Image (cartoon, rainbow, N blue to C red):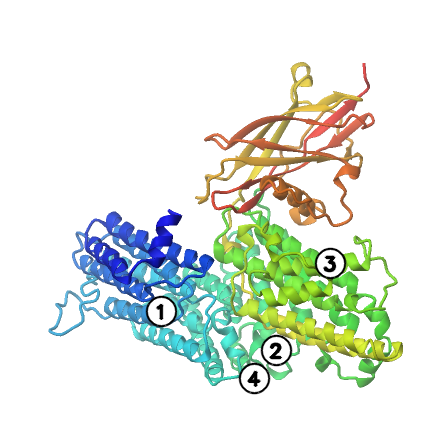
């Protein structure tokens, strides 16, 4: 296959056009599966051609092929629309193929930003002929044929299909517009295309308010357009600010109409869309109104949690454009909604105040989730995500208060001067804060690998948040790289200042080596590392960053930190200690103030997966000792001085409940125990009915996952440890391999060397994992308790 693709890279353009012609003929087929398959195959071939050309640094002979494929796909969509004019032939198979073709279209466009304008124009025509057809009208002479007769509006089936088409187009546009790249002119043109689409949908009186609103949200999304808004180098950003705020008012009006009509389920879905697109003021208003209109205690707590979360994120949204955001706040005030947000209309949108209030709201959101009594694992992801978000804000607030940052919020100049005078004491706290931020980055990494059915977009959001923690950790730790600056406090869990420096750089380089090699080289110079960047190939594929505006903003923070570090290193050579300490304090305060303000204005978004409320995919482990089970069933015991022989069963849970698009051929399970895991249990109980495993409270989870990861990918590299975890000294462990059957069960056996353990009962900590067919590493959360074994006196 690789040889064929390589030859296609070098082939004449006419030969590729022949493939287009063959596929075009197949696309006219009314057999849905074959026509869509032909197009998908050709797009896959082109994708492989592009990937191979990039790897081998060769030029592709035909650069017009993507545009021709776009036209081919949209022509096929037009043909499907004409089929829908016959209601006896129209059906969900047509809608399904349109959805499949839109997915292929998104895959095709990829990095070709210039194709986005063509696609959006085709989509506009698609929508035009869907919504403008009247009851049974025939095509007028000279009218465009695209999707003419797609729906007969007298038939309810036609109305349903129209709604399905509109929903499919909206979902496509969200994915299509994510991670936009290009210059101001291109982004401005794309925005205008989307604006025309949205205004056309909004102008159709027979389209419901829910559909109008979700299309309007496309123009009021900091997630999609936030970085164009903040770009003050061109004129496009200025026009987008006003538009985004104006369309925010429109989305609030639509939300109000939906709620007045008591269409609560469409209102909830609209609130979810608003949250996902970063329109947090809109989502806060919707969830706040819905929480009083539900019967279930669980639903009420869930909506209250979403309301608090939207309040927290809404504080940051209003910071994006403080002067124009007053319009949103005034609308809320005039209509009697969200007094907690509307009270800010008369005051300054201060970053420090927003941080504190956001932190308090996140705590309240987390508390509401804690009030929900549900089956095991239903709200595991939501709780874990909010716990980590809360810890991040708590750490950033500590950093702000430690150095008196964001001084625009300090009214007393004497307070600033006092901080500068005591700067040395404050700087002593930075390594501890840096360590905490880096730990949070790894915990977000852990979160992303523990839910095997997570979608790519949600995984990308978590990976970007993880990068932000790593960047802030480096910025907070720049004093570690300054010569002659020592710290009084122990850098637990690190044994030396240079060890912490190396870890900060290594963690950041591991995330950025494919994104910006130049920044990585400068980072390595700080610790005199000449290690090849290719050594970081062990990164799990589901943690690879997408280059987007959010990542670019984080890179700018990283560059600022590098520039500040090199500048202070040079100044320290020619200045006295007292002078350099004052300069270090001023520089660090300025750097971290700017870094935090930039960080607060990055619209990270909320993972789509956050709104999936189902039991999480995980595993249960059942253990028996071979000898004792024959005498006393359901017990695990061993005589003192001997190794523990275990028969194990690993059972996957909830894997069929969701359609998990992965194949699992092998599973791995790490068993770990130590003397500190002494248990009062005397009869080998393994707490199988454990209902509330809390991975965010497990201090050993990251190290266990790290060891499993290196074992699963057969790495010879020694796993990284935090310093508090020494596998050889602190306990005994073993990794067991399973091959699951069709029921998701795997059986195996192992020996655990507990020969030095004294008499007593001990828990066995465990964690399982797998590597899917795409090479992505996944942890499987333990959904039952820890097995307990008993060491008995030798007979």
* Residue 337 or residue 201, whichever sits in front: 201
Dot 3 or dot 1: first in sequence order is: 1
* Residue 157 or residue 666, whichever sits in front: 666
Q: Residue sitting at 36 percent across and 75 percent down?
A: 193
Q: Which residue is mark 3?
A: 502
Q: Which residue is mark 2?
A: 343
Q: CA distance from mark 3 to mark 2?
A: 46 Å
Q: CA distance from mark 1 to mark 4?
A: 35 Å
Q: Which residue is mark 1?
A: 115
Find residue 323 and name its label.
4
Give the secondary structure at mark 3: helix
Q: Is residue 75 left or right of residue 401?
A: left
Q: CA distance from mark 3 to mark 1?
A: 43 Å
- Residue 787's quadrant in the figure? top right
**At which x and y percent is residue 425?**
86, 70
- Residue 309's quadrant in the figure? bottom right
Q: Is residue 750 left or right of residue 69?
A: right
Which of discs 2 and 1 lies nearer the camera? The answer is 1
**At which x and y percent is residue 514?**
56, 60
Which of discs 1 and 4 lies nearer the camera? The answer is 1
Query: How many residues crowd mark 2 within 10 Å: few (<14), some (14–19), many (20+)?
Result: few
Is residue 353 at all visible to an observer of this figure?
Answer: no
Q: Residue sitting at 12 percent across and 67 percent down?
A: 138
Q: Is residue 291 left or right of residue 577?
A: left
């Amino acid at each position: 296959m690789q040889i064929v693709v390589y030859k296609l890279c070098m082939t004449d353009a006419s030969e590729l056009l022949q493939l287009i012609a063959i596929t075009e003929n197949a696309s006219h087929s009314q057999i849905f599966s074959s026509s869509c398959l032909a197009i998908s195959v050709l797009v896959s071939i082109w994708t492989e051609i592009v990937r191979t050309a990039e790897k081998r640094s060769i030029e592709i002979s035909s650069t017009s092929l993507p545009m021709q494929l776009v036209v081919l796909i949209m022509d096929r969509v037009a043909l499907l629309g004409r089929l829908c004019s016959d209601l006896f032939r129209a059906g969900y198979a047509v809608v399904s193929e349109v959805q499949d073709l839109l997915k292929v279209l998104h895959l095709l466009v990829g990095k070709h930003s210039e194709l986005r304008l063509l696609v959006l124009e085709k989509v506009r025509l698609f929508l035009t002929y869907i919504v403008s057809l009247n009851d049974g009208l025939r095509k007028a002479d000279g009218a465009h044929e695209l999707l003419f007769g797609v729906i007969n509006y007298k038939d309810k089936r036609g109305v349903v299909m129209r709604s399905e088409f509109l929903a499919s187009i909206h979902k496509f546009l969200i994915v299509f517009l994510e991670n936009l790249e290009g210059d101001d002119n291109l982004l401005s043109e794309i925005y205008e295309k989307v604006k025309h689409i949205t205004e056309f949908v909004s102008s159709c009186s027979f389209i419901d308010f829910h559909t109008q609103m979700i299309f309007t949200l496309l123009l009021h999304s900091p997630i999609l357009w936030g970085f164009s808004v903040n770009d003050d180098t061109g004129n496009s950003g200025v026009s987008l600010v006003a538009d985004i705020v104006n369309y925010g008012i429109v989305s609030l009006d639509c939300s109000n109409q939906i709620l007045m009509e008591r269409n609560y389920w469409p209102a909830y879905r609209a609130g979810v869309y608003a949250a996902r697109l970063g329109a947090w003021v809109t989502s806060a208003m919707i969830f706040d109104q819905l929480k009083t209109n539900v019967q279930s205690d669980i639903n009420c707590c869930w909506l209250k949690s979403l309301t608090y979360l939207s309040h927290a994120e809404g504080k940051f949204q209003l910071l994006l454009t403080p002067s124009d955001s007053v319009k949103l706040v005034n609308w809320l005030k005039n209509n009697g909604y969200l007094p907690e947000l509307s009270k800010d209309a008369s005051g300054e949108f201060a970053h420090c105040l927003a941080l504190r209030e956001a932190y308090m709201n996140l705590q309240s959101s987390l508390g509401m989730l804690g009030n929900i009594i549900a089956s095991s694992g239903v709200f595991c992801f939501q709780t874990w995500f909010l716990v980590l978000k809360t810890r991040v804000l708590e750490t950033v607030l500590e950093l702000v208060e430690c150095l008196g940052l964001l001084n625009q919020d300090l009214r007393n100049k004497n307070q600033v001067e006092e901080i500068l005078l005591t700067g040395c004491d404050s700087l002593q706290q930075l390594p501890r804060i840096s360590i905490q931020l880096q730990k949070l980055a790894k915990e977000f990494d852990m979160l992303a690998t523990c839910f095997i059915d997570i979608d790519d977009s949600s995984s990308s959001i978590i990976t970007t948040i993880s990068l932000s923690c790593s960047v802030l950790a480096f910025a907070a730790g720049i004093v570690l790289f300054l010569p002659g600056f020592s710290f009084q406090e122990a850098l637990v869990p690190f044994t030396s200042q240079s060890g912490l420096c190396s870890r900060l750089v290594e963690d950041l380089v591991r995330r950025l080596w494919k994104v910006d090699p130049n920044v990585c080289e400068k980072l390595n110079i700080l610790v005199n590392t000449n290690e090849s960047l290719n050594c970081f190939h062990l990164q799990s594929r589901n943690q690879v960053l997408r280059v987007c505006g959010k990542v670019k903003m984080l890179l700018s923070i990283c560059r600022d930190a590098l520039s500040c570090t090199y500048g202070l290193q040079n100044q320290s050579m020619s200045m006295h200690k007292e002078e350099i300490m004052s300069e270090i304090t001023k520089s660090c305060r300025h750097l971290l103030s700017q870094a935090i303000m930039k960080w607060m204005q990055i619209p990270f978004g909320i993972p789509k997966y956050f709104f999936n409320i189902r039991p999480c995919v995980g595993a249960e482990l059942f253990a028996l000792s071979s000898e004792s089970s024959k005498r006393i069933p359901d017990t695990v015991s061993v005589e003192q001085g001997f190794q523990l022989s275990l028969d194990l069963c690993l059972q996957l849970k909830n894997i069929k409940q969701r359609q998990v698009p992965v194949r699992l051929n092998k599973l791995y399970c790490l068993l770990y125990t130590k003397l500190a895991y002494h248990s009062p249990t005397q009869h080998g109980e393994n707490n199988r009915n454990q209902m509330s495993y809390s991975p965010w409270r497990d201090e050993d989870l990251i190290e266990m996952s790290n060891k499993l990861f290196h074992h699963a990918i057969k790495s010879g590299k020694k796993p990284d440890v935090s310093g508090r975890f020494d596998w050889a000294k602190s306990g005994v462990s073993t990794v067991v391999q399973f091959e699951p059957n069709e029921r998701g069960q795997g059986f195996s056996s192992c020996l655990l060397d507990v020969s030095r353990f004294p008499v007593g009962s001990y828990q066995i900590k465990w964690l399982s994992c797998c590597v899917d067919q795409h090479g992505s590493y996944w942890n499987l959360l333990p959904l039952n308790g820890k097995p307990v074994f008993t060491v008995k006196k030798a007979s």
